[in-house]
Image: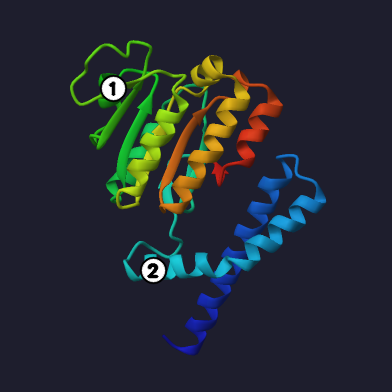
Amino acid sequence: MNEDDHRKAFLRGYEEGLKAAWREVASLTTRGYSSTELGVMARSKMAVIYREVEALAARLAEGEGETGETGVGHGVVRGRGAYLVREPKAERIFQIFQTLARAGARGLSITRMHPDDVRDRCDIEPAGFVWLSKSVGKKVKGIAVVEPTALVDIASAIAEFAADGGNAVVLLEGLEYLIAQNGFSSILRFLQKVNEKIVLNDSYLLLSANPAAMKEQEYRLLAREMVGEI
């Protein structure tokens, strides 16, 4: 690579960095943060930006492309963490789940819909299934049946799966059902706890959410806990 190529590559990287920074700012300003909160988050981000650089360098070394982004249809997963998948009904979340699974992530499906219906939607068989149902006495081979109110058990299942080697992708469908069964405050605390385990174990959490089916303030509170919305 000659000097001109180096200069062009540097400018492309600089441009992408600016775009990413302003996308992040635009995303945060739509979530109701105050200027003080934005300042604190910006300083926190800058303090750990070296981690993202190191992660990108590792992905480049593994041949994952220049941006390190995983294409997922209408959105992009930009790194490990929790994401809200905005959709009227759970559809696109399965495409994103499959994309990450094909890239090597271990998949755990936690759904209100029956796991057989999940299998119909996914070409890749998840490593584990958790069915959110009140039919806990019913034995289903290869499927864990959990009460929707058993948030501690659900959180433990996610934490254990993510901790078992990291690089996990957890699909969570049935948010409105969980809120109806537990109340929003309980679900928010549940997701805060789960998100910590996901980040600590270098994994992904995908959460299908329909903003139209939720109170605006509640959706914004959920969005604050996420890496992004896709």
The residue furthest right is 35
Label 1 Cα neighbours within 10 Å, binned few <14 / some 14-19 / many ≥20: many
The residue furthest front is 152
Q: In the image, is residue 225 above or below residue 176?
A: below
Place of residue 33 in the rendered image (x, y in percent of width and height, measured from the top left): 75, 44
Residue positioned 48% across, 39% down in the render = 194
Q: In the image, is residue 182 above or below residue 28?
A: above
- Quarter of the view holding residue 32: top right
Query: What colouring style does the render use?
Result: rainbow
Q: Which disc is residue 133 wearing?
A: none
Q: Amino acid at mark 1?
A: Pro
Label 2 Cα neighbours within 10 Å, binned few <14 / some 14-19 / many ≥20: few
Direction from residue 156 to residue 209 in the image, left or right: right
Q: Marks 2 and 1, Cα distance to the nearest angstrom?
A: 35 Å
- Quarter of the view holding residue 142: top left
Direction from residue 31 to residue 11 in the image, left or right: left
List the residue tagged with mark 2.
58
- Residue 180 shows in the view: yes
Q: The residue tagged with tag 1: helix, strand or loop?
A: helix
Residue positioned 41% across, 27% down in the render = 91
Check contact, mark 2 vs mark 1: CB within 8 A: no
- Residue 96 shows in the view: no
Q: Earlier in the sequence, mark 2 or mark 1?
A: 2
